[in-house]
Image (tube, rainbow, N blue to C red):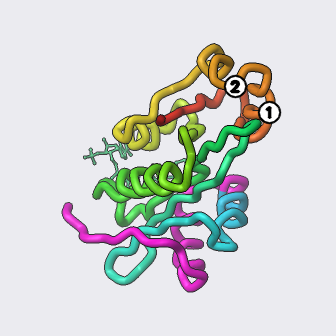
Amino acid sequence: MNTSFIIRPMSLNDFSELTEVIDTSFLWLARSLALHSVREGQQVLISEAQGTAVGFVKLTNVQVGSGKFGRVLWVAVHPKFRRRGIATALVKAGFESMTHAGATAVFATVRRRNVASLTVFGSQGFRKIGFLELWRLFGMRIFEFYKKIWLAPWIPVLVCD
Ligand SMILES: CC(C)(COP(=O)(O)OP(=O)(O)OC[C@H]1O[C@@H](n2cnc3c(N)ncnc32)[C@H](O)[C@@H]1OP(=O)(O)O)[C@@H](O)C(=O)NCCC(=O)NCCS
């Protein structure tokens, strides 16, 4: 189905609509973490369709040593608006925004079973990056990197550079 939507920075007025997106997209722990991280509206891009916020991407800066990187922390789309390319557009806009601001690579962590999310990130050039490649990138600072972005050892790290 074709739906026209725009992507723009979040304003605080979007919060109640994003709360519904989060409530319908995540289970309890992720839900409260996601709510917490969008509450202040910093580095959040939203997709607006039919005058309503129907999806969002939350971005964060990751500094490792002197290296500047970005991370897509959350992406979600209201169930009524899925499979219309909205998450794909949000991830693309998020990547562009972070690289424009100086990030040399953008990371994400996605559970193996989350085929929808892996497909969305994959379509935008994100690929799995393992320990050895991260070691080549960060050297001994790899542990600083893991501490900043890793959720659990079994959750793959994706990179787009
Ligand atoms: C993952 C998520 C953000 C995808 O949003 P979306 O707007 O529906 O994604 P898109 O429309 O851009 O999907 C692009 C492609 O990804 C794949 N895809 C998306 N959802 C899929 C699904 N449920 N199953 C299989 N493939 C899927 C398809 O190839 C799709 O292209 P197509 O519709 O032309 O077949 C959405 O399902 C969601 O909010 N899930 C819950 C929250 C979540 O898991 N977030 C990610 C971790 S933070």
Q: Quadrant of residue 59?
A: bottom right
Residue placed furthest toward the left? 2
What crowding class fits label 1: few (fewer than 14 Cα within 10 Å), some (14-19), or many (20 or more)? some
Q: Residue at 34% of width from left, 71% of height from top?
A: 6
Mark 1, residue position:
144
Mark 2, residue position:
138
> 22 left or right of 127?
right
Percent from the top left, x then y, of residue 100?
48, 54
Are the residues at dot 2 and dot 1 in contact (C-beta closer than 8 Å)? yes
Instruction: Confirm whether the magenta stretch covers residue 21.
Output: yes
Q: Is residue 47 above or below residue 57?
A: below
Q: Which residues are magenta?
A: 1-30
Q: Is residue 142 above or below residue 68?
A: above
Front-most of residues 144 and 75: 144
Secondary structure at badge 2 equals: helix
> 4 left or right of 23?
left
| Dot 1 amino acid type | Glu
| Dot 2 amino acid type | Phe
Viewer-nearest of discs 2 and 1 = 2
Q: Earlier in the sequence, mark 2 or mark 1?
A: 2
Percent from the top left, x then y, of residue 153?
71, 26
Instruction: Confirm whether the magenta stretch covers residue 15.
Output: yes
Is the distance from the Cβ of mark 2 to the nearest ligand 1 atom less than 8 Å?
no
The N terminus - image quarter: bottom left
What crowding class fits label 2: few (fewer than 14 Cα within 10 Å), some (14-19), or many (20 or more)? some
> 36 left or right of 19?
right
